[in-house]
Image (cartoon, grey):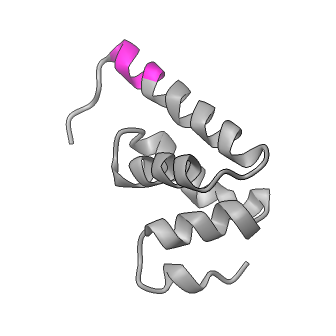
Amino acid sequence: MKHRHLDAGGFTTAAIDDILERGRLTDWVPLLREVCRDPFGPAAERVMRVVEHHPMFGTSTVWRRFVARRRAEVSARGRPRQ
């Protein structure tokens, strides 16, 4: 999926919305990796904002739970300093 909102670099709110709404699982991989790397970072915060304000059947629940789980895992072992 050629993503028009990623040209500016990074995971903007518009890019995340587009990826989650129109992308396939393979399109989600870079975002999954970024949220795994930093579940409290800007991309994860934007994911949570997108799924809260733009309900997508199934997708919103999956991402909400994924971010929450990664945050719990990181918190349980102590959040790494950045």
Position in image of residue 8 (x %, y %):
41, 84
**In this rendering, is residue 54 above or below 19?**
above
Query: Is residue 11 something one can see in this rendering?
Result: no
Quarter in which the C terminus is drawn: top left
Name the foreground residue: 53 vs 71: 53
Name the foreground residue: 53 vs 29: 53
| 66 left or right of 80 in image | right
Position in image of residue 48 (x %, y %):
49, 45
**In this rendering, is residue 27 above or below 45?**
below
> Would you say the magenta stretch is mainly helix, strand or loop?
helix
Residue 9 appears in which quarter of the rendering?
A: bottom left
| 35 left or right of 55 in image | left
Say whether residue 80 is magenta: no
| Rendered residue at 72%/52% (across/down) | 56
Position in image of residue 53 (x %, y %):
54, 53
| 55 left or right of 25 in image | left
Magenta residues span 72-77
**In this rendering, is residue 15 above or below 32?**
below
Name the foreground residue: 61 vs 1: 61
| Rendered residue at 34%/47% (across/down) | 41
Quarter in which the N terminus is drawn: bottom right
Name the foreground residue: 74 vs 58: 58
Position in image of residue 58 (x %, y %):
78, 43
The residue most toward the top is: 76
